Image (cartoon, rainbow, N blue to C red):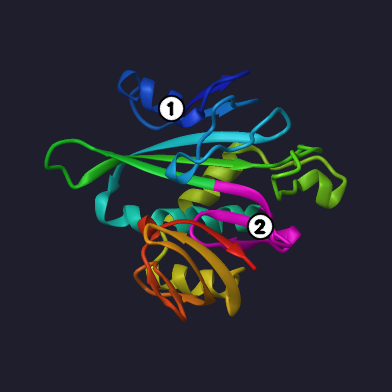
Amino acid sequence: MCRILLKKVTSTQDFAEAVSSMIEGEFVVVAEEQTRARGRMRRKWFSPRGGLWVTYVKRSFPVEEVPFSTLKVALAIVEILDELNPRIRWPNDIVVNDKKISGILIEANVSGNNNKADLFIGFGINTEVKDFPPDVKATSYYLETGKSFQKNIEEIIETINSWLSKDNEQVISKVNEILSLKDREVLLETNDGEKKCKALFVDYLGRLVTECGIFEVQDVERVDVL
């Protein structure tokens, strides 16, 4: 697989999308630093030197599987960081003690009437980051363990592909086992304004079920534990 290593880039996701048509087959973009990284809803993402900033482009991915891919990649990152006892903060963050250590951004490019897509799997892991801005509630592998992160990109990609091949029901069951929001009061920033209520579980359509309603991923801008 082609690997593109960059010192600094605005966003690995943007770079991968820009060069995708020029590269045959799957490829991965890895940057030491991102200057305008973005997450869901184009939210800014703090990604200085000391982190692992990646976009993995997977070809001919079934379109019907795209909605579940975020949770599958999240479970892959959880496996990679298993020693930290991480949890999933629906829909696309990995947290340790409610502090963000990893985030995921999935985008798909479908050509014509094809039922296959180019899947752009963007993820970041705070590996060696030692300092965060005051308004960023986050942690890193180094801060949690005092050690350097040893997993290589090939191992991470292999783990991601393993989870992408798993059954959706199995995936949702596992997500609910390690859901950081489960049975907790949360603040949801939605398209209809802020809502405070207890989160319950993720259903088999990937939606967050709460005491004040059922929420699709695209209807929620942000979720915070109160």
Q: Is residue 128 above or below residue 164?
A: above
Dot 1 crowding, Cα within 10 Å, few <14, some 14–19, many 20+: some
Task: List x then y, in percent, for residue 129.
Answer: 76, 37
Residue placed furthest toward the front: 193
Residue placed furthest toward the right: 146
Q: Amino acid at mark 2?
A: Val
- Between the C-alphas of marks 1 and 2, the distance is 25 Å
Q: Secondary structure at mark 2?
A: strand
Q: Is residue 2 above or below residue 184?
A: above
Answer with left or right where residue 67 lies relative to residue 111. right
Residue matched to label 2: 95
Dot 2 crowding, Cα within 10 Å, few <14, some 14–19, many 20+: many
Magenta-highlighted residues = 81-103
Answer with left or right where residue 217 lies relative to residue 158. left
Task: List x then y, in percent, for residue 63.
Answer: 26, 50
**Residue 14 image label:** 1
Q: Is residue 159 above or below residue 212?
A: above
Q: Residue at x 37, y 21 (%)?
A: 18
* Residue closer to the observer: 167 or 98: 98
Q: Quadrant of residue 95?
A: bottom right
Q: Amino acid at mark 1?
A: Asp
* Residue 94 covered by magenta stretch: yes
